[in-house]
Image: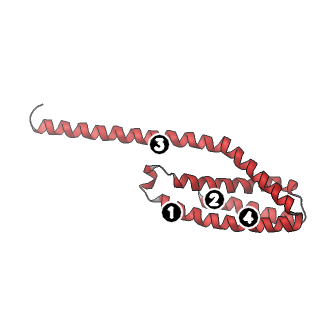
Amino acid sequence: MDPITIMAGATAAFNAIKQGIQVGRDLQDMSGQLSQWAGAMSDLGRAETKNNNAPWWKALNGSVEQEAIQIFAAKRKAAAMRQELKDWISVSMGPSAWEELLSIEAEVRKRKKEDEYRKEEIKEAIINWAVGILAVVTGVAIMVGIIYLITLQQGKI
């Protein structure tokens, strides 16, 4: 996912959590929103890792730099959200509630890494191999064509 989409989901979950805290809901009652927010934070970290290790063919169109800027901005917004959320939760529910949120976030990150990210890595590996093989086959075909044209021109065929 792109950073803009990730932050849209994170912002929606953040606002729902903040609203829930304001009306006195417990963290367990907001588990869906907490999971959504934690998942978005995990996705943002994953997007940064992917952008830092982008395949060579993705760098050709310049999208890596643009995505890096979007990720930077999203990380800054996420850090502000995290701090505000920490302040709200610590003040209204106590520091142990913030620790509970951190454990939920760690669990979501672990689950996503095991499930979703692994599938994504396999899909990306297949695409990278396919693009690489296509590039090699195209290069060989061009070389064979050039050799054929040269030998044809020299009259050896």
Disc sitting over residue 82 in the figure: 4
Mark 3 or mark 2: name the one nearer the start of the chain: 2
Specify which label sits upstream in the sequence, 3 or 1. Answer: 1
> Residue 11 vs residue 5: left or right?
right
SS for tag 1?
A: helix
Q: Nearer the viewer, mark 4 or mark 1?
A: 4
Disc 3, disc 4: CB below 8 Å?
A: no
73 lies left or right of 40: left
**Mark 1 sits on what residue?**
66
As measured in the structure, the alpha-carbon distance from the residue carrying label 4 to the one carrying label 1 is: 24 Å
Q: Position of residue 71 (x, y in %)?
A: 58, 62
Mark 3 = which residue? 128
In the rendered image, residue 157, in percent from the top left (x then y), is placed at 12, 31
Closest to the camera, between mark 3 and mark 4, is: 4
- Amino acid beneath label 2: Thr
Q: Say left or right for 7 vs 83.
A: left
* Residue visible at 43% across and 50% down in the picture: 57
Indicate whether 76 appears above or below 112: below
Residue at image location 62% in from the left, 44% down from the top: 117
Q: Position of residue 145 (x, y in %)?
A: 23, 38
Separation of disc 2 and disc 4 at Cα?
18 Å
In the rendered image, is residue 82 in sight?
yes
The kind of residue on which mark 1 rests is Gln
- Which mark, by number, is residue 5? 2
What type is the residue that disc 3 sits on?
Asn
Sequence-wise, the earlier of marks 3 and 4 is 4
Determine contact: label 2, label 1, CB under 8 Å. no
Depicted 131 relative to depicted 5: above or below = above
Q: Are circles 2 and 4 on residues that touch, CB within 8 Å?
A: no
Question: Which of the 4 quarters of the picture holds residue 92?
Answer: bottom right
